[in-house]
Structures are given as structure tokens and as C-alpha cells.
Image: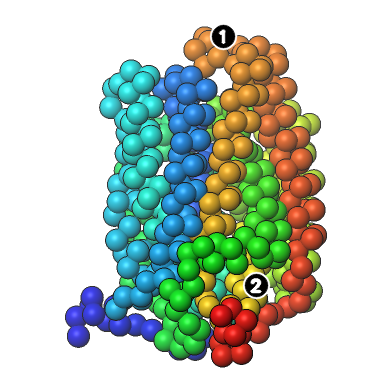
């Protein structure tokens, strides 16, 4: 049997093997590397390095967010409804890998163009990036609750996945300034792109496996309208996704503001951003174990509430720091909260999917991750609006040769500390209202629930 046939015909029947778990988790490395590099530096690159007006970049980011959001539920619903010899999820992942890596690299390699041309380049290249990113990431995420079926399996299986992801974040955000400072933006893009390609190929070949023991009905038996209706009427999902939107907005604002904070508030070299971002993600790694244990001992909901509280209180510390050492301590505290969010958000969403399967008799991971992706992409819109409004109101001007107005420092501290705290409070209130409070939702009995749907 050929290698292609072996990959195509693989199915998992019980708990995944350790090698499969590790290979599956490896996909988080390139996914987080690309997404966090984009989130942390794309606004800075186009506004500060290429001198594109912040308002234009904000508009382009909104176009990106709207397109990405629209693609998520569409790809998710199609993935749920259509089976192939390769499965429901695996074909999308395989097709999307190369376009994803190429488009990511081209974002940082625009030709010499006037301002309007740079915006056009950004919109077109990012559109390709968005399509490929959704195809790969949504379907890889949808495999997680299918491969790992209990809270215990999910918290343990998610640890290597998040460790890979955090290492990807460190390289993508903390080391990226060192790369573009010393080698330039195009070289950074090519190096990171090649690393991502290798990791995605390994993960696809060794860990992207679908189940052979699927017992629920095919999602094609439910209309598109009913799929959305059941999803958006699900109280557990609504409270979860709003909380996720608010907390991910906080993260997006903090990460995107770090380069401005380093350069214009602390007046340090851009490469020192590696210290703050590195501290966040290094602290997140050991915290994964603690948050996993807390989730198993109490419940994913309880652990998530504590996580959000730690994150919000830590973020406020950036408002009062005046040097790199104090800011690094704040970043370490923030990283403990980030580790919990990385570990628990998808575990909680998996509980929502399990509860939905009890009610509908369907495993609809695609539509849930898709609608979740649609809504949480609003975090990019919020982040872009906050950046444009605050920088505009404070008189920030990237073309100035001398110091920025004094109000710029206050505005940047507002963006990195106070505004994220506000969004975090909203997230905590949403997660407090989350109705699934137990440890595990049992697997559905398809025949018992079919009558409720039909």
C-alpha cells in the first residue's frame, strides 16, 4: 500500500496512541507561529515600517476579519456535511497547507508600491491566507473533540498540543523582532514559512486521523438553517463564545500593543519586545499542568473562571511599569493566565459539542468551531478599532523624526492594560453564566435522541 493510501485509510477506534497525540499536537506550532506573528506585528509592520496611515490599516484589518469570520461557519458546515474516502476533516487540511504557508510569507514581502498599492497587496494576500488558514485550522480544531472523548483525555491530550503552540508563539512573536531586526522582514518571512511547512507536513502525516466508530447520523440530515438555529440557540454555546470573544480581544490588544509599548512607552529597542512576549509564553508552559489538574479536580468551567481572573488582574500591571524588568514580571504573571486560556477554552467548547450531540444525535464539531471562529474574529475588529482610535486621539505620527506627543504614552498604556481589563471582566461574567458545570458530558445515544430532532 502506498504512503498516500496509508494516510487516507487510517482510522482511530479507541484512545489515540502517544505518537498520534504528539503528532496531532505538533500542528499547533505552525498555527500559533503564523497567527501570533500576524497578530503581533502586521499592524506595526504596515504602520510604523511602511508608514501606511493607521486608519487605512485598520480598514484593511476589518476586511480581513470580516472575510475570515464569514469563511469559518461556511467551511465548518461543509466539513460536517460531506464525507470522502479521506474523511470529513483531513482533505481540507491537506489541500490548505501549501497555500497557507506561501500566503503567510508574502504578507511580509510586499513589492515597492505606493500606499494604495500596499493596502491592495495586503487585502489580496491576506484573503488567500484567510481561506487557507480556515481550511487547515478549523478542521484540525474540529478533530480535537473527535479524537479525545473525555475531560481526562482532553486535558491530558491538550498538553503537548499547547506546548507546541506556546513554542510557536515564542518563535513567532518573541523571536520575530530579532529576525527582522538582524535579517530583515523578507528573510524572517521565508525562515518562518519553511519551519511551518515542515511541521504541518509532519502533523498531517502522523496525527490527523478520523474516527472509525462514528455512531451519530451524518450532519447532512439536518438543514443548513437548522444547523445554525440549533447552534445559536444553545445557551451553553452563546455564553461560551461571548466569553471567548471578550478574552481573545484582550489578548489581541495586548499582543498588538507590545511593539508600540516597547518603542514609544519604555523607549527601548524593538528587539526587547522579545523579552515581554517570551516571558508570557514561557510562564504559560508550566501553568498548563496546574490548570489541567484544577479542571480535573473541579470542572473546566471553574478552572476557566480562575484563569480569566488571573489574566485580567495581571494585565493591569502594565499600566504602572517604567522599565523592562518590571514589565517582564507583569508578563510572567500574565503568562500564567494565558496558559490556562490556551488549555481550557477548547476543552470547554468540546463539552458544548458533546451536549449538542446528546440533543441532536450529530457530531457537529465543524459548525461549532466555525461559528465560534466567526464570532471571535470580532476580536481582530475590536483590536484594530481600539488601535486606530487611541493612536489617532493621542496624535501618534509614525513619520515624526523626534519624540511622539506625551499623550501617546498614556494612550498606549490604556491599550495594553486598562482596556484589556475591561474586556476580561465581560469574559468572566459570561463564563460565570456557562451552564455546563460537571466534569464530563457522556457520549450520545443516537437512537434515543433522533426523535427529539425529527
* Image mark for residue 351: 2
**How many numbered tags mark residues here?**
2
Q: Quadrant of the N terminus?
A: bottom left
Q: For residue 102, say whether it is visible.
A: yes
- Dividing the picture into quadrants, the one containing residue 339 is bottom right
Q: Toward which corner of the image does residue 98 lie, by quadrant? A: bottom left
Secondary element at tag 2? helix
Q: Position of residue 9 (x, y in %)?
A: 30, 82
Which of the two labelled residues, at mark 2 and mark 1, occupies the earlier sequence position? 2
Q: CA distance from mark 2 to mark 1?
A: 53 Å
Tell me where residue 325 appears, x and y as whole percent.
Answer: 70, 37
Q: Residues within 10 Å of mark 2 (few under 14, many from 20)?
A: many
Q: Which mark is residue 131?
A: none
Query: Which residue is located at x 59 percent, y 85 percent?
Result: 451
Residue 227: x percent and y percent? 53, 66
**What x and y, as percent, mark residue 240?**
68, 60
* Residue located at (61% from left, 18% from top): 392
**Residue 258 sits in which quadrant?**
top right
Number of the label disc, if any, that sits on residue 402: 1
Nearest the camera: 15 or 96?
Answer: 96
Label 1 environment density (alpha carbons within 10 Å; few <14, some 14–19, many ≥20): few
Q: Nearer the viewer, residue 205 or 435?
A: 435
Q: At numbered mark 1, what does the secondary structure look like: helix, strand or loop? A: loop
Assign the C terminus to one quadrant of the image.
bottom right
Does residue 247 lie above or below 220 as drawn? above
Left or right: 241 in relation to 400: right
Point 52% across, 9% down: residue: 401
Amino acid at each position: 500500500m502506498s504512503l498516500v493510501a496509508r494516510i487516507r485509510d487510517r482510522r482511530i477506534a479507541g484512545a489515540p496512541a502517544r505518537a498520534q497525540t504528539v503528532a496531532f499536537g505538533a500542528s499547533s506550532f505552525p498555527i500559533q507561529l503564523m497567527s501570533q506573528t500576524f497578530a503581533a506585528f502586521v499592524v506595526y509592520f504596515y504602520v510604523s515600517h511602511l508608514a501606511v496611515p493607521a486608519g487605512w490599516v485598520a480598514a484593511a484589518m476589518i476586511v480581513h476579519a470580516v472575510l475570515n469570520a464569514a469563511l469559518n461557519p461556511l467551511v465548518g458546515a461543509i466539513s460536517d456535511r460531506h464525507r470522502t474516502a479521506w474523511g470529513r476533516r483531513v482533505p481540507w487540511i491537506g489541500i490548505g497547507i501549501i497555500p497557507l504557508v506561501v500566503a503567510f510569507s508574502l504578507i511580509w514581502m510586499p513589492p515597492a508600491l505606493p500606499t494604495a498599492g500596499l493596502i491592495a497587496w495586503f487585502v489580496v494576500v491576506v484573503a488567500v491566507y484567510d481561506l487557507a488558514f480556515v481550511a487547515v485550522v478549523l478542521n484540525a480544531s474540529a478533530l480535537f473533540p473527535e479524537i479525545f472523548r473525555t475531560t481526562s483525555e482532553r486535558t491530558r491530550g491538550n498538553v503537548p498540543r499547547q506546548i507546541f503552540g506556546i513554542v510557536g508563539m515564542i518563535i513567532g512573536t518573541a523571536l520575530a523582532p530579532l529576525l527582522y531586526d538582524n535579517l530583515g522582514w523578507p528573510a524572517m518571512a521565508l525562515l518562518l514559512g519553511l519551519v511551518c511547512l515542515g511541521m504541518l507536513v509532519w502533523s498531517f502525516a502522523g496525527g490527523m486521523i478520523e474516527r472509525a466508530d462514528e455512531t451519530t447520523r451524518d450532519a447532512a440530515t439536518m438543514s443548513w438553517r437548522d444547523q445554525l438555529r440549533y447552534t445559536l440557540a444553545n445557551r451553553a454555546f452563546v455564553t461560551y463564545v461571548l466569553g471567548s470573544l471578550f478574552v481573545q480581544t484582550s489578548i489581541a490588544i495586548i499582543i498588538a500593543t507590545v511593539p508600540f509599548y516597547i518603542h514609544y512607552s519604555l523607549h527601548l529597542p524593538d528587539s526587547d519586545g522579545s523579552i515581554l512576549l517570551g516571558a508570557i509564553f514561557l510562564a504559560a508552559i508550566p501553568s498548563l499542568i496546574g490548570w489541567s489538574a484544577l479542571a480535573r479536580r473541579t470542572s473546566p468551567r471553574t478552572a476557566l473562571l480562575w484563569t480569566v481572573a488571573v489574566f485580567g488582574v495581571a494585565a493591569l500591571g502594565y499600566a504602572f511599569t517604567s522599565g523592562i524588568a518590571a514589565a517582564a514580571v507583569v508578563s510572567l504573571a500574565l503568562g500564567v493566565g494565558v496558559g490556562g486560556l490556551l488549555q481550557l477554552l477548547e476543552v470547554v467548547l468540546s463539552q458544548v459539542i458533546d451536549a449538542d450531540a446528546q440533543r441532536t444525535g450529530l457530531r457537529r464539531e465543524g459548525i461549532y468551531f466555525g461559528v465560534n471562529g466567526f464570532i471571535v474574529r470580532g476580536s481582530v475588529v475590536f483590536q484594530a478599532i481600539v488601535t486606530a482610535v487611541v493612536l489617532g486621539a493621542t496624535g501618534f505620527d509614525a513619520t515624526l523624526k523626534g519624540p511622539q506627543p506625551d499623550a501617546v504614552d498614556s494612550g498606549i498604556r490604556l491599550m495594553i492594560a486598562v482596556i484589556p481589563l475591561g474586556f476580561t471582566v465581560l469574559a468572566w461574567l459570561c463564563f460565570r453564566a456557562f451552564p455546563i458545570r460537571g466534569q464530563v458530558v457522556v457520549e450520545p445515544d443516537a437512537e434515543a435522541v433522533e426523535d427529539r430532532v425529527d
